[in-house]
Image (tube, rainbow, N blue to C red):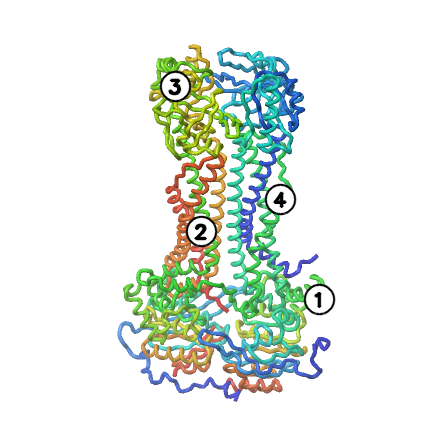
Amino acid sequence: MNERTGGRPPGAPLIVLAGLQKAYHTPAGEFYALKAIDLTLQQGEFVALLGRSGAGKSTLINMVAGIDRPTAGEIWVDGHAVHRMSEGQLTRWRGRSVGVVFQSFQLMPMLTCAQNVALPMDFAGLYGSPRQQRARACALLAAVGVAEHADKRPAAVSGGQRQRVAIARALANDPIFLAADEPTGNLDSQTADAVFAVFQQLVAAGKTILMATHDRELASRVSRVLRIEDGRIVEDVQLTSAAEGRALVAEMDA
Amino acid sequence: MMMRARAYKTLSDLWSHRARTLIVSLAVAVGVYAVGALLATQTLLLREFHSDRNAALLPDASIYTQPFDAELAERLQALPGVAAAEARQSLRARVPVGEGARRSIELIAVDDFESMRVHRFPLLAGRWPQHKNEMALESMGLAYLGVALGDTLTVELADDTQKQFRVTGLLHDPRYPSPEITNFTVGAVTPAGMAYLGGIDLFTELLLRVDRAQSTPPAVASVVASVEERIEKSGRTIVGHTIAGQAIIESIVNTSVMILSFFGWCILLLSAFLVINTISALIVQQVNQIGILKLVGASRGQMVSMYLTLVLVFGLLAFLIAAPLATWTARALLTHLIQGLLNLRPESLAVPLWVYGVMGTISLLIPVLAGLLPVLQGTRITTYAALNGQAPQQAGGIVLDRLLQRLPRRWLQRPLMLAVRNTLRHKGRLLRTVAVMSLGTALFIAVISVRISVDATLADFLRYHQYDVQLQFQQLHRTARLEEAARSIPGVLAVEGWVLGSASRVRPDGNDSNSYQVVALPAGSQRVEPIVYAGRWLQPDDGYAVVLNATMAQDEPDLQVGSTVVLDIAGDKHPWQVVGIVGSDAQGPKLYMNQGMYGYATRSPGRANTLLVDLQEGVGQKTMEALLLQRFEKAGYAVRTTRTAQTLNAQNRLMFDVIVSFLIFNAVLLGAVGSLGLSTTMGINILERIREIGVLRAIGASNQAIRLIVLLEGVGIAVLSWGIGLLLSYPIAQAMSWQIGVALLDTPLSFTYSLPAAVVWFFVLLALAVVASLGPARSAVRLTIREVLAYE
Amino acid sequence: MLLKWMRSRLPRPSQAASCPPPNSGSNDGPNDGPVIDLRGVVKVYSTPAGPFRALQGIDLALWRGEFVAIVGKSGSGKSTLINMFTGIDHPTAGEVVVAGTAIRQLDEGQMAEWRGRTMGIVFQFFQLLPTLSVVENVMIPMDLADQYAPEERYARALYRLEQVGMAEDAHKFPAVLSAGQAQRAAIARALANDPPLLVADEPTGNLDVRNAEGVFELFQTLACLGKTILMVTHDDDLAARVPRTVTIADGQIVDEIRR
């Protein structure tokens, strides 16, 4: 993965957000969804973003993933100035360097699971011929445990399986980091656990993940927890061990 | 080779929405078909029409003079400007076709069939006549006279003598349309045959073809003048000449092509509107997918090319549907309708490649042009907006929204208001749908109005033919004796004697015009009910006063009411006063004058050559026509032609049949485009509003309420379109009547607006709207709120 | 501080305390039964991966004037439960009884009419009809249910808007409203036919804190006025301020708190 560390010096943070603001135009005036966010993420971190609906979680995820553009401030990802990219550059960069996972999966309904996973490779022109792309897609589906559904349409598999396909698709072009917006929001607790386990494996393999969630139990099992409220980061806690996370859960249930 | 994932998406967009693929392709296909069928028909028709006539080497002018031999013609051919000159002799005769009926034939004597240089007849079957009792018959004459190749034909002359001819061959004479229209056919005989018929084996007609470089009418006239001079030097008097103008057949062709073009391009425009509607809806429906594609790294170029590929496939399918149909239509029209009416013999039915080229280009261009803007707009929205299903913004419409707020609140209940506002929601789409349907409405009403105007015009023609049967004699007879003879025949109610003669105008430059028909009526005759365009009708005490019909006025544009015209009537040149211009009767240019003056000018007072006969109630025109002919011939009067008012009317109608059937064909196509338009629009509207229907459900809307809202929307569009179409239909109908009338008759049709057509079409549209909305309404009712509000 | 926030499920002093207690315990005569009664409701969805039991036997009764919050994680069955209450979906087993009658016999159209008269629904995304002005949006349930004399409807709709503080915006179209205003208008529409029951599915989910607070207070007021309110939320802070909280997990009621 080191050969793809862009313009970033070794050891420097993977993601740097500086003075990030996002305003939406509403009939009632400017609405600031994000108000001056400063944040640094290191490679290999598994970060959970907590907050109520409307607090700005999704907006922040969208900024980092290059899905939406900031009103002010800077976004540096892997040495790239994301805030300066044009819409076209942004799309190209996102396709190759970011994997995005949504609550609602966002799979193409008419493509099979394997085709969905191969789609980013196709657009980026990576990983060779369609046959080779398919082979890679199948390998990724196997890695998230849904190899047997490769040739089914998303509608023919369960929610948990769809989310795994979406994760495999997010990994298609071997991105530097994964942005996940409520990835378990539509899943029952067992399935959510299984999907979360996939994330844990990815982090163990060196991926960086930023995950918005309002599931506190899951949030307690990551390496770092951020809490966002009315467009500001109000809490930032490093969880150094699994034991600390478990302690946190135990404390919550008490 | 494995398919790329994105190619599979495009393929799946086509295949899993087969109905949509079919509708878009059909919408494009209708336009391509309309234009393709137009171009193919036009190309085939004009090509074959001209090649047919060119092959016949039709004369530019004919000169009538005293008898001469073929040798003179060959000498005249050497004159400068003359490309070919050939001697001919022709004669009108009758052929008995059973039960006393007679049909006319023009018999032409040809010097040498093997070396015809002007007006060359192709031999279609059999062989040329070699003996005096042999004849080659125009191929359409077989059915007209009821004979077959090899049969013997009886030709009856003016003096009642009958001669037998064997039909040895079939020829093709492209000068005239079907004998059903002209009421005569053509046969060719040897000079000996002409002598056998009582003529001489010399010639009185010289057919001339000038050098192609000088084929303009004034150039032809000067060549004719020099040829006439040479003939006069040979000691022969010139009787007259005819310079070929545009044949009636050409105006039918030109008018048909004009109408086809107008409708073809209209339909293409309308189908383009439909395609814009469907493709922008497709993009709106795929906004979320566009978001996903952007999310996984699809550049705008990649997406645009994906969607344009999709759209090109629609075009390709449209071409595959439309091209064979268009070719087939053009061929069917030519072989089944036009060929028989125009007496056309197509050499080839090959549609030229460029027509396919145009169809192919239109097929691909229409969907691409229609799709380009929605595709560019759709792919421009940000990933965020696309993922959240925010459709590209529709511009404009603020004024309309403001207006909507002012809609009266008291009487307009909310469900109704919802339907009204939904109708106006997508202004662009509504505008295009309404354009399609209102133009369809306008053209439909216009077509029916033209049809009715044709009937009115035909009825107006009969104002100049107020009789049941007309007999025209070879010579002038004492009017009193003719009338007396007629009155003695049982079934005859009333009778009046006319003179049908001819006159040519001596133009101010000294040249003679072609000869025009003169109708000389008894003073105070009630047998013409003219539509007076200018000036007045004849009065009993008129002297050198003449009334022109509209066709004549068109041919001699410098003549107006009050002008003086020098007429050459049988050699007597005298100035006449133009006192009026009246409507045309589709029988060519005519001059009306008092019979007394004509008799004076021709030194034949009290004589007539034509009898107009009114019959008693319940007596058939056809039977009496035969009876009158028989009685008069037996009594020693040589009858030239007979005709009944019914056959005259039928002939006139036949000419319009081609045009009217084109019109109705196009109206049907327009109707198809209109209904396709409404049903796709309704389908798209409902599809977009599924969530709102769920909301309505959630706040208590019954099945009936939802169905009503959807139906009202469809009916609203239909009624709006009808209203606009109604406004447009009057000027369009008027313009079409004018164009068709002028093109075919040199005079506008007697315009009649068809209000019943407007009313009928209103109900057709209403039914169409209900049917088009019923499907979407049913599926809207079937949706459960759970499906509708299953938001993420 | 984060840990403290995570523990914040402990009840706070309820602002509804000033409101008189609901009459769930008292005996008021014949109309004394629950407004809505779910009896052993089971809902099974068939999914490609096999049958999925979204609700596994729910017994829940709502009484007149009660303000009930249903909390639970996404996927816990909250939304399915709401669909049972509103008649948007039918249970696989068990009964939904409203005013003594089971509603399973009604078809989709009849259900809509019944719903229009008996309950108002408030959605997370407001779902105002974009082609109607605010006051027209409030009038449409009256038209559909044919409630009140036609000439009365406008005045009634204005009164409803006044109730939610939206009278000034009555003639605006939904597109120009802020989220908070739109949700107030949606609540006014839910109140149009003066239904006894108000069902709100994540009504504050799309609002910022200030607007969420305003909407919540509106619900509290309505509960005081005798409306039965059922609110699904995953905002624990709000849930903690509701007199009765039902927690649902994996299709079962796992906790119920009355304050």
Q: Nearer the viewer, residue C29 or B555?
A: B555
Q: Residues within 10 Å of mark 4 (few under 14, many from 20)?
A: some
Identify the secondary structure beneath mark 2. helix
**Residue B772: numbered disc:** 2
Spatial CA distance of label 1 from label 4 is 43 Å
Residue that label 3 marks: B497
Chain of the residue displaying label 3 = B
Which residue is located at x 42 percent, y 43 percent?
A: B445
> Where is residue C182 drawn, in percent x and y?
41, 72
User: Marks 3 and 4: CB-CB under 8 Å?
Assistant: no
Q: Please name which of the two marks, 3 or 2, marks the residue nearer to the observer.
A: 3
Q: Please name which of the two marks, 3 or 1, marks the residue nearer to the observer.
A: 3
Q: Residues within 10 Å of mark 3 (few under 14, many from 20)?
A: many
Identify the secondary structure beneath mark 1. loop
> Where is residue B591 drawn, in percent x and y?
44, 27
Residue that label 4 marks: B356
Spatial CA distance of label 3 from label 4 is 59 Å
The disc labelled 4 sits on which kind of residue?
Answer: Tyr
The disc labelled 2 sits on which kind of residue?
Answer: Ala
